[in-house]
Amino acid sequence: MTDASEKARPSERILATAFECLVTNGYANVTMRSIADEAGVALSQLTYYYKNKENLFLEVINRMTDQYLAQIEATLRARSTPGEKIEALADFFKNLITERPNLLGIFIDFTAQAVWIPSFRKQLDSFFATSIEIIERNLPETAMKTEARPEPVSKQIATLIFGAIFGTSIQTLISTDRENGFESLRLIEKILNLI
């Protein structure tokens, strides 16, 4: 009889391989068979753990989003003023673009797939909602007030902050003119600091 740690090893190896295949080839170009071959497991073993490609990649994205959310929270908590927090969030995405572009690329791929695959849409919607909650929780309500609207509109502003930075990061990653994208991220910081 095998213990739980022995059972987990093939599952973890499959997930790690699926992640690498996704980074290298994208969702549309990866098959369950190619993952099984790369992981050194039988296709039946892969389907035993994950049933199908969608379930496998949902687990990959679950792990990635958990990691991203923890990093975003830590990034925001490490700063004290709202301006520093917005700058840190923009820097977080700049670092993704320059140091780990494949990770941001995976999110772009999953975002595109979410248009067609309801389970991906649900998972990414949850990721976006939690990201917005983290931003809202880490920016004081007084930083979320405007002259035109003295009561806080923190969820809407947090949504704007996340959307502006995430969207511009995607454009920057895809663009051949990254410096212009980085300038746009710096401009977003300045504009958001006026809110």
Image (cartoon, rainbow, N blue to C red):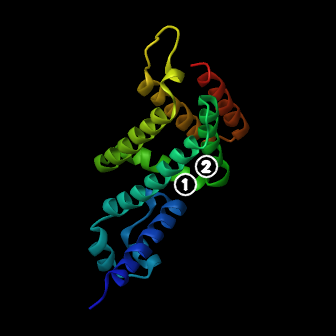
For badge 1, the amino acid type reads: Leu
* Mark 1 neighbour class, 10 Å CA radius: few under 14, some 14 to 19, many 20 or more: some
Q: Residue at x 55, y 49 (%)?
A: 104
Residue 105 against residue 146 in the figure, above or below: below
Q: Residue at x 42, y 69 (%)?
A: 15
User: Which numbered marker is on residue 103?
Assistant: 1
* Residues tagged 1 and 2 counted as in contact (Cβ below 8 A): yes
Closer-to-camera residue (137/69): 137
Q: Which residue is mark 2?
A: 96
In the image as oriented, which residue stretches furthest toward the bottom? 1
Can residue 53 be seen at all in this image of the molecule?
Answer: yes
Residue 127 against residue 37 in the figure, above or below: above
Closer-to-camera residue (160/51): 160
For badge 2, the amino acid type reads: Leu
Cα–Cα gap, marks 1 and 2: 7 Å
Would residue 1 be found to the left or right of residue 6 on screen?
left
Closer-to-camera residue (56/77): 77
In the image as oriented, which residue stretches furthest toward the right? 179
Q: Residue at x 59, y 24 (%)?
A: 192
Q: Secondary structure at mark 1?
A: helix
**Where in the figure is residue 168, as x and y percent of width and height?**
58, 35
**Where in the figure is residue 162, as x and y percent of width and height?**
50, 34
Would residue 23 be found to the left or right of residue 34 on screen?
right
* Mark 2 neighbour class, 10 Å CA radius: few under 14, some 14 to 19, many 20 or more: some
Would residue 195 be found to the left or right of residue 10 on screen?
right
Q: Secondary structure at mark 2?
A: helix
